[in-house]
C-alpha cells in the first residue's frame, strides 16, 4: 500500500479540525475565540494542519467534481487529445464536442467547475487568514511563515482564474456581510495582485524540500508559480517579462534540491511522492481520495472496457479520451515518450491473450489501438492512442494513487529555455532543451541534441482539418519558435497545460486540427459562468460571449 503523503494526512486532520470549530461562514468572534482558546492550543504539528483544507481545493480545481475542470479543459480544447463520441457514449449533451470545436457557452460545467473551485480555495484561505490574524486560532510559533504560505496558496487560485477568465473579482476578506458582492478587476490588475502576493511572501516560505513540505508551497514551489506567471505575462498583460521568468527559474535551479529523473516515467509512477523532479504536486490516493470529487480516474476515462482484463481492474473502464493523430505524428519514432506515454497497438489480457472488441463496428475483432480517428463526432473502440503517461497499476481501483505533478523540474528548465530563446539567447535555450531530451533518446543519443537554430524551425505539427468530413492544410510559417512549441508538447503531453502553451504561441484560436476550426480570438478566455453572473451584479461577461 502506498505511503500516504504527509499533505493528505494534513488535509484530513485540518478538515476535521476546522469543521469542528469553524463550520459557520459568519463567525461570532466572542463565542469562537472562547472555544479556541479553551480547547485548542496548536503546537508545531497542528500549525501545518491548519492549511490542509484549502489545499484540498486544488484537487477539485484540477479535476473538478465531474472531471470538467483545469486538466480536462486544457486537454480537450487543444490539439493533443480529444473525447470523441464512442460506441458506448461520451456524448453527454455535446459538452466534449463543444470544447473541441470552441463553441462552448457560459453554461458549460467546465466554466462552473474552475470558477467555483478556485473561489472555494480563495474563501478557505481568506477564512484561515481571518482566524489566524484575529487570534481566533492562537498561532504563535511559525505564524509569519504560515500566513505567507496561505497568501501564496491563495495566489495560486487567482493564477487559475487569471488564466481562464482574466477579469475577475479580487477578494481578500472574509468577514463581509452576506449581501457583499465584490467588484471586478481587470486581468492586468489580477496579474499585478498575484505578482505582489508572491514576491512579498515567497521569501518567508519554508526553504526545505522534504516530507513536511510535500504537496505544499515551499519557497521553491512559490518560485515555480512566479515563473509561470512571468512566462505568461505577455498573454495576461500584453507585456512579456522573460527576464523575471529566468530569474525565478534560476532560484529553483540554484537551490540544488531538484533534478531530472533518469527516466521520465518515474515522475508519474504510482509511488511518485519521492521524485526529485516534483516541485509541487497534488497528492492523490486510491483509498483516501476516492470519492467522486477527488478521485484521479484517468485510466478509467481513456481505456476501453475490455482493458479491465489487461490490468485486473476491479471495475470496467469507460473508454473515451485519446490522442489526436496529428499530434502523435509529430513524434520522432526514436523518442521513448512515444511508446512510454501512449497505450497503442494490440491489447492483451494479463495472461497474454489477445483482447477482442465488444462494442460497435469492431465487435468480435482484435482490440488494436491505431493512430487514426474519424472525428470528434465519430469513433470506434480501436481509434486513437490512449493516455498512459501516469502509471496504471495492476488491480487499480476507480481512483489512482499517482500524485499529480503541477510543477516539476523539467518545467523549470523548459520555462527558462523558452524565456532565453525569446530573449535572444538561443544557445542557452538549446542546452536546456537538450538536457531534458537526453533521457528520451537512449537508443539514439545523437537525436537528443537540439541546436539553437533548430529551435526557430517551423513546427512539425500538420495543422488543418483532418476528419471524415474535411481535410485541409494550415500555414504554420507564422508560428514563431514552432520547434520550441513542439518540444513543450512532447515533454508535457497529458499534463493538463496544452491550451495555455498554444495561447502563448498564438495557435489556440488561429489553427485547425481534427474537427476543430478557429472560432474567434476571444476563445482564449472562458466565459464567466452564468451562475456567477446571476449572483453578482457587479460582474460583466467576457467579450464575445
Image (cartoon, helix red, strand yellow):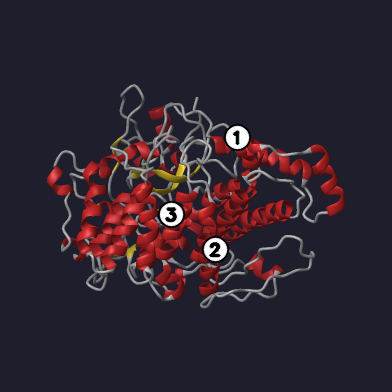
Establish if 63 lies above or below 272: below
* Disc 3 from disc 2: Cα separation: 17 Å
Location of mark 2 (residue): 161
Per the image, label 2 sits on a secondary structure element best described as helix
Quadrant location, the C terminus = bottom right
**Residue 168's image quarter?**
bottom right
Q: Position of residue 532 (x, y in %)?
A: 65, 66
Q: Position of residue 35 (x, y in %)?
A: 83, 43
* Disc 3 from disc 1: Cα separation: 24 Å
Establish if 494 lies above or below 354: below
Sequence-earlier tag: 3 or 2: 2
Give the camera-side residue of 30 and 315: 30
Q: Nearer the viewer, mark 3 or mark 1?
A: 3
Question: In the shown orientation, is residue 20 left or right of residue 365?
Answer: right
Assess disc 2: are there few (<14), some (14-19) or many (≥20) residues with their C-alpha within 10 Å of its C-alpha.
Answer: many
Location of mark 1 (residue): 9
Residue 115 visible somewhere in the drawing: yes
Give the camera-side residue of 524 and 10: 10
Assess disc 1: are there few (<14), some (14-19) or many (≥20) residues with their C-alpha within 10 Å of its C-alpha.
Answer: some
Establish if 327 lies above or below 512: above
Per the image, label 1 sits on a secondary structure element best described as helix
Q: Nearer the viewer, mark 1 or mark 2?
A: 1
Q: Position of residue 403 (x, y in %)?
A: 47, 40
Per the image, label 3 sits on a secondary structure element best described as helix
Question: In the shown orientation, is residue 468 left or right of residue 101?
Answer: left
Location of mark 3 (residue): 224
* Disc 1 from disc 2: Cα separation: 28 Å
Toward the top, the furthest residue is 351
Tag shown at residue 454: none
Question: In the shown orientation, is residue 328 left or right of residue 545?
Answer: left
Amino acid at each position: 500500500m502506498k505511503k500516504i503523503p504527509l499533505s493528505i494526512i494534513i488535509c484530513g486532520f485540518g478538515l476535521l479540525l476546522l469543521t469542528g470549530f469553524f463550520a459557520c461562514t459568519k463567525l461570532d468572534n466572542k463565542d469562537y475565540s472562547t472555544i479556541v482558546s479553551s480547547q485548542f492550543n496548536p503546537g508545531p504539528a497542528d500549525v501545518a494542519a491548519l492549511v490542509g483544507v484549502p489545499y484540498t481545493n486544488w484537487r477539485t480545481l484540477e479535476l473538478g467534481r465531474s472531471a470538467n475542470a483545469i486538466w480536462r479543459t486544457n486537454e480537450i480544447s487543444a490539439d493533443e487529445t480529444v473525447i470523441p463520441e464512442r460506441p458506448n457514449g461520451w456524448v453527454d449533451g455535446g459538452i466534449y464536442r463543444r470544447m473541441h470545436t470552441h463553441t462552448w457557452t457560459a453554461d458549460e460545467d467546465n466554466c462552473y467547475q474552475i470558477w467555483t473551485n478556485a473561489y472555494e480555495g480563495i474563501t478557505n484561505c481568506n477564512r484561515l487568514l481571518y482566524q489566524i490574524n484575529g487570534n481566533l486560532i492562537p498561532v504563535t510559533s511559525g505564524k509569519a511563515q504560515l500566513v505567507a504560505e496561505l497568501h501564496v496558496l491563495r495566489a495560486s487560485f487567482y493564477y487559475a482564474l487569471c488564466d481562464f477568465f482574466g477579469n475577475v473579482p479580487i477578494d481578500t476578506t472574509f468577514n463581509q456581510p452576506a449581501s457583499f458582492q465584490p467588484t471586478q478587476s481587470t486581468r492586468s490588475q489580477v496579474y499585478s495582485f498575484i505578482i505582489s502576493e508572491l514576491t512579498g511572501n515567497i521569501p518567508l516560505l519554508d526553504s526545505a524540500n522534504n516530507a513536511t513540505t510535500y504537496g505544499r508551497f515551499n519557497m521553491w514551489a512559490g518560485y515555480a508559480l512566479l515563473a509561470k506567471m512571468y512566462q505568461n505575462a505577455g498573454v495576461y498583460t500584453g507585456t512579456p517579462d522573460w527576464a523575471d521568468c529566468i530569474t525565478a527559474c534560476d532560484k529553483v535551479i540554484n537551490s540544488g534540491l531538484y533534478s531530472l529523473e533518469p527516466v521520465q516515467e518515474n515522475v508519474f509512477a504510482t509511488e511518485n511522492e519521492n521524485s526529485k523532479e516534483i516541485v509541487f504536486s497534488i497528492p492523490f490516493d486510491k483509498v483516501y481520495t476516492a470519492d467522486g470529487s477527488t478521485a484521479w480516474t484517468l485510466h478509467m476515462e481513456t481505456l476501453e472496457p475490455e482493458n479491465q482484463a489487461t490490468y485486473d481492474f476491479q471495475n470496467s473502464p469507460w473508454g473515451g479520451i485519446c490522442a489526436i493523430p496529428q499530434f502523435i505524428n509529430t513524434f520522432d519514432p526514436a523518442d521513448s515518450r512515444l511508446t512510454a506515454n501512449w497505450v497503442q497497438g494490440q491489447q492483451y489480457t494479463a495472461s497474454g491473450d489477445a483482447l477482442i472488441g465488444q462494442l460497435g463496428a469492431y465487435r468480435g475483432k482484435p482490440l488494436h489501438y491505431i493512430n487514426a480517428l474519424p472525428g470528434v463526432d465519430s469513433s470506434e473502440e480501436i481509434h486513437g492512442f490512449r493516455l498512459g503517461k501516469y502509471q496504471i497499476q495492476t488491480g487499480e481501483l476507480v481512483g489512482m494513487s499517482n500524485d499529480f505533478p503541477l510543477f516539476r523540474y523539467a518545467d523549470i528548465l523548459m520555462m527558462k529555455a523558452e524565456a532565453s530563446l525569446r530573449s535572444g539567447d538561443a544557445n542557452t535555450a538549446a542546452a536546456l532543451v537538450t538536457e531534458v531530451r537526453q533521457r528520451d533518446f537512449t537508443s539514439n543519443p545523437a537525436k537528443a541534441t537540439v541546436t539553437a537554430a533548430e529551435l526557430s524551425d517551423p513546427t512539425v505539427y500538420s495543422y488543418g482539418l483532418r476528419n471524415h468530413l474535411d481535410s485541409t492544410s494550415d500555414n504554420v510559417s507564422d508560428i514563431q519558435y514552432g520547434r520550441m512549441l513542439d518540444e513543450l508538447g512532447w515533454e508535457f503531453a497529458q499534463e493538463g497545460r496544452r491550451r495555455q502553451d498554444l495561447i502563448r504561441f498564438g495557435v489556440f484560436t488561429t489553427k485547425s486540427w481534427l474537427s476543430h476550426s478557429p472560432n474567434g480570438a476571444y476563445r482564449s478566455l472562458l466565459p464567466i459562468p452564468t451562475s456567477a453572473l446571476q449572483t453578482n451584479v457587479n460582474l460583466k461577461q467576457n467579450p464575445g460571449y
